[in-house]
Amino acid sequence: MFRFAFALALCFLATVANAVEIDGKIDPGEWAGARHITDFRDTQPLTGKPGSMPTEAWVMSTPKGLAIAIRVTQPASMPRTRQKTRRDESALVDRINVMVDFDADGRTGYDFEVTSMGGVADEVITSESNFSYDWDGHWEHAVSEDADGWSVEVLIPWYIAPMRAATGDTRTIGLYIDRVVGTTGERMSWPAASFNRPRFLSDFEHVELPAYSQALLAVTPYVVARADRAHGGTSFQEGADIVWKPNGQTQLTATINPDFGQVESDDLVINFTPEETFFTDKRPFFTENQGIFDFSLLEDYTQLVYTRRVGGAADDSNDAADIAGAMKLNGSVGDMSYGVLAAQEKGDAGRTFGALRLSENFGTQSLGMLATHVSHPYLDRDANVLGIDHRWKPNAKFTITSNIVGSKIDQPNNRSTGFGATTIAEYEMTPVWSQQWLGMHFGDTLQVNDFGYLPRNDFDYAHWEVRQRLTALPDDSAYSSHLWRYRIIGVNNTEGLRLERQFRIIRDSQRRDGGEEFWKINVDSAAYDDLLTRGGNPLHTPPNLTLIYERVRPRIGHWSWKADAEIKGNQLTGLHRVGYMVKFVPTYFFSDELSIFTGASYETTPNWMIWQHDNLVGAFDGRTIGIDMGMNWNIGNRQEVRVKVQALGVGARLRQAYVIDRDGRAVESNEPVKDFGVANLGFQIRYRYEIAPLSNLYIVYNRGGYETEDGVSDANEQFRHSLGLRDTNEALVKVAYRLEF
């Protein structure tokens, strides 16, 4: 009995010793025995030299989670940013980042960001350096400051993400910590890894820590009250999200009768191309522990699981489908990670979605599989997709990533199978020079868009890119670093038709004022556009050139601003008629909490080729006028008021109708084609109050619409018309409260 009591007392003392109060004040007694880190080096600019100001960190494993303290020295000679930010806001301010790869395998990481004013952001990192703000986790943080600098303490619960079982009494994680100086843009990191290099997640420092496990059961019931002024009527809906994490190896998430009301608004897009616009997913269920399902086809935004399909436009209408429920199970068995996702829409036309993901590491190699299934009862269609991905890191400088994917569609009069494959090789020759080779093939019968996202199929793509990083710039230069990229691109469709031959130059620069600058030049030879006529004759396009410029200047005094500009030729006459786009978004800060932004844009598009039917296209002279305005008021760290207004007016005056012949020539036609105009509006007022972590009250007003009109080509008139659109005109109140057991 005495021995049992003595052992119990030791356990109690050990727990007390490991207890860390997250108050932002680094108590030496609390952090005694923690790993102490001081070797922070510059990774922005990427010189690898010791940082200009001292930074220290302490890392400790506790029963309640991974505890990290960071002490940032920032004397009065280096101005501190005082701007308050809303959750997940990307702002050029003083901040720290703690990034953790819980399995230390370079597949999935989690970023926990804290600003000097206590603002937070969290992101999921996949494919080495792809960051997604859409995920929100429950973790603790606190900040304090004094004359010499500021301090941060962070506690990340062990249940926050899936992780494999520990080996014995210890766990090895991948860890990265940095601090960023808002007024200069300098980033000091440990280890000296950079997301501007081919490897980032894989370069995290491996840290061995005592292993702990936590369980979590969380239920988040919610209720939504909506008043629809556009169509009349009110509605009430209730539902719940459920998260059960008995340990790091098993995590179950479910949603019942979900409401995905518009508390977040998408940016306006007017798209007359045959390629679908990609939107990120901010719905909590689909962002929780979603990293396991990342299966990129190694082209921009491509995925085999694109969760915006669930609850998207219904098969029997253009209205959004209602979701009856969804479930997600992920975790690990031994060294194998797994994920299962299932979702069911309501009604006789409701689709059934399913996905299974497996992945495992084998030393320098990793191998994974993703299978998806979608059943469309209204279309009598079943879509099955299988993908296999592989990554090989033979040494510290060379990485090869490959995948193959196949599809099988069962539908009356539309049965097909398709195939695609991608390989990308990256070689970092020196700290200055690196190369990338990429090859893709997507067959003309490959269909992954029942659940995935692929802008187009039917093409073969190859590029060779050389990168040059310059950091040894003169002290009086406005720039701290340049990253140059030189790329040669070739694209054919699977019948051998030339779709693109391009030489591209990109310069991505960091400025000493903490801002960023971006230049891109695309030089295109003559080619063909085989998508314009939606399966008809391809259009022969002349040589062309595109110049793009972007500039972000951080807050100095009361002002910050962003600028974008683009100059390009057109598909019909190339550089004989040049279009341009300019956009300027200044932000004025009344205080550190309250700001307004008043952006405006103007675009001209000569010989804008828009498909009408069959092989008939119209060449229009287009003008687009837009505004992007709003207000952000961060009332402390728990309340925010946000106003966002985006409006676009498009006027398109017909120059000539053309029929595309079999040789790709645009032949003048007398077939009737009308001028047209487009008006588009998105307006939202949103109040958010954080009741508790991941528990919020939203009060939202949404108004907007989209309208096209034939015979009208005045962009000014369409812009004025957009401000009165009311296709959507609703107010909603949403309350969600997370209960943890």
Image (cartoon, grey):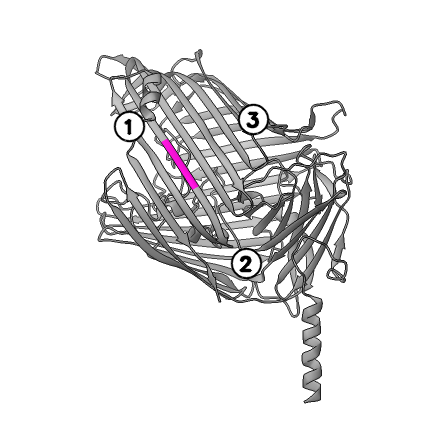
Task: Evaluate whether residue 217 shows in this view.
Answer: yes
User: What's drawn in magenta, residue-wise?
Assistant: 682-686
Kindly identify which residue carries mark 3: 561
Write the residue at 70% across / 88% down: 2
The amino acid marked with disc number 1 is: Glu
Distance (Cα) linking label 1 and label 3: 31 Å
210 relative to 617 in the view: left or right: right
Cα distance between the residues tagged 2 and 1: 44 Å
Where is residue 451 shown, x and y percent of the image?
A: 37, 47
Vertical placement of 209 versus 700: above or below?
below
Residue 339, percent from left and from top: 46, 58
Figure quadrant of the N terminus: bottom right
Q: Is residue 278 visible?
A: no
Q: Amino acid at mark 3?
A: Trp
Label drawn at residue 707: 1
Determine which residue is flagged by label 2: 160
Whether residue 699 appears in magenta in the rendering, the answer is no
Q: Is residue 201 above or below residue 598?
A: below
Q: Residue at x 54, y 55 (%)?
A: 138
Q: Would you call the spot at circle 3 few (<14 residues within 10 Å), some (14-19), or many (20 or more)? A: some
Residue 731 figure quarter: top left
Res. 222 image quadrant: bottom left
